[in-house]
Amino acid sequence: MHVVATAGHVDHGKSTLVRALTGMEPDRLAEERRRGLTIDLGFVWMWEAGQAFAFVDVPGHQRFVPTMLAGVGPVAAVLFVVAADEGWQDQSSEHLAALDAFGVRHGVLAVTKADRSDPEPVLADALDRLAATSLGRVPAVAVSGRTGEGLPALRAELLALGGRLPRPDHHADVRLWVDRSFSVRGAGTVVTGTLGAGTIEIGDEVVVAGRRCVVRGLQSLGTDHDTVRAVARVAVNLRGVDHHELGRGDVLLTPGAWRHTREADVRLRGEKAEGLHRELVAHVGSAAVPCRVRPLGTDLARLSFSRELPLRADDRGLLRDPGEHAVPAGFDVLDPRPPALRRRGAAKARAVELADPAAAHVRRHGVVPVAELRALGWEVPGTCVGRWAVAEDLPERLASQVRERVAAWYERHPLSAGLSVESLRSALDVPDDLVATAVRDAGLRVRDGVVVDPSRTATLPASVESAVRTLERRFAREPFVAPEAHDLAKAGLGPAHLAAAERAGRLLRIADGVVLGPRALDEAVRVLAKLPEPFTVSEARRALGTTRRVAVPLLERLDAEGRTRRGPDGTRTLRRPHT
């Protein structure tokens, strides 16, 4: 489906033209028909060569410009109407200024009432005016809604226009700007709008006005659907909210996909920032929100809205001055989550940052979830670690901090295995993914929950070194006679000292308080290989020349390492390579 908004001065034949094209009545209110002018938005459609064209017929009267903007805001194409017998008028200019401010790039010019006056001068004048805006040079057709003259040519131009429109992203997050809300007997709340991107299905959960609702029904072009894909005019039947709570300017959103904001830094199109009044109305989608303008540079400004809006970078809107009945500028959103401006000169510095707002955002925060960047409308501007976007120099800085902290830890705790990962994570205050990367980039490793330096040569304090050497001499004589706990305590070897000696490869702990030499397991296998198999614990104990306090945990350690096999009766055999 292609959605096209009408635009043009009051009584220039917009409604008559779409009525002639579609055979449908766009003026849906009794007052509109009585007065002969469009007051609210009208919606009609036609089929041409298998393509659907939905028209958003907007009012042309100056008093209803906000309604006109609500219809044009979410739409990518326009049917611009100028009457041949009256030519260009004030509201023609305001509507064109609005289209230019919204950045509408696709359209067709229709010079109506061609049966009343020569259309050529008006057509040439209107084309020149449109060419100076975002629309550029557009196709033009002279038509008469009364006689039907030019309608086949206009249909052909609309069909060609449909081929030029950008293809929508059906997988995009849904943001449906509401232009009408009402209740249908037996169905409940219904909202309508133009779906510019994404897909809506019955049963979907959506958020609107801060409420979670469920889509219970969908209709497009007068037909019920289970699924509606962009681009489309759509009516959505909602369960979970009363229609009185909703109105034009509310937004139907994919849950969790959008971020609401009361401020946005923007680039202006049109009037320069310093020339704008400070209090204006911002029009985005179908919303009209009072805002305050703070200049940041020649064409840069900060907009502070009276209520929150779900905005992303690259969103477009316009600023309207209701007092002067003018549209002084359009705007492109650069940063929907700008930082506070508190210090003197902050506005000037901010203008520099807006050359690359996404990079500035990541640099300011250091670490930002990639999902958060995308919710704000940005791609990852630089380095990405897992699901995190990081400031360009952060990985190097983190690696340096890790090296410094681990080195300092070893200096203070020479007997320690290393700095615990939890302590490091707390000190760095960054996500786990970045801690792991920083440890790797620092040339370190994580072992048993602590960060260790594999290049570090383990050294023992002098007192510990002396005690360990004494044990080594003892094990050289009696390799399987473990010192008693009181002997270790007398030598000044507590649990931390024994652990450090084991990490240094000087001792082997086979159980709590049971310490042997580092090659005790190999030596035990050599001795046990001389026993008839299977052998008992007692036989092993005697062969090793030790006690049950040592023999039992020593055999269990050999079992665990797969060097012996324990039978159901408690006897053991050695595991040999060929078995």
Image (cartoon, helix red, strand yellow):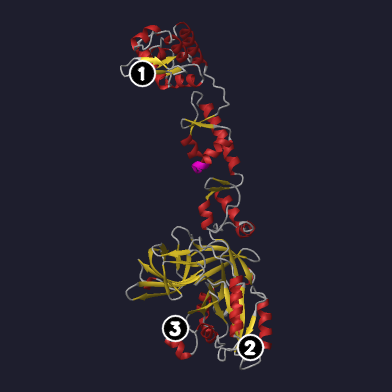
44 vs 543: above or below: below
Q: Position of residue 27 (x, y in %)?
A: 47, 84
Q: Is residue 307 visible?
A: no
The local crowd at label 1, few if under 14, some if 14 to 19, many if 20 or more residues have their Cα within 10 Å, is some
Which residue is located at x 46 percent, y 20 percent? Answer: 497
Q: Is residue 141 visible?
A: yes
The residues tagged by marks 2 and 3 sit, at their Cα atoms, a distance apart of 27 Å
Q: Position of residue 529 (x, y in %)?
A: 43, 10
Look at the numbered discs 2 and 3 and tell me whether their residues touch, using CB distance below 8 Å. Answer: no
Amino acid type for the residue under numbered disc 2: Gly
Q: Residue furthest left?
A: 569
| Earlier-in-chain disc, 1 versus 2 | 2
* Residue named by callout 1: 566
Look at the numbered discs 1 and 3 and tell me whether their residues touch, using CB distance below 8 Å. Answer: no
Task: Tell which of 461 and 13 is nearer to you.
Answer: 13
The residues tagged by marks 1 and 2 sit, at their Cα atoms, a distance apart of 103 Å
Task: Tell which of 517 and 109 is nearer to you.
Answer: 109
The local crowd at label 2, few if under 14, some if 14 to 19, many if 20 or more residues have their Cα within 10 Å, is many
* Residue named by callout 3: 28
Q: How many marks?
A: 3
User: Which secondary structure lies at badge 3?
Assistant: loop
* Residue named by callout 2: 87
User: Which secondary structure lies at badge 2?
Assistant: loop
Which mark lies nearer to you, 2 or 3? 3
Which mark lies nearer to you, 1 or 2? 1
The magenta region covers 429-433
Q: Position of residue 212 (x, y in %)?
A: 38, 62
Amino acid type for the residue under numbered disc 3: Arg
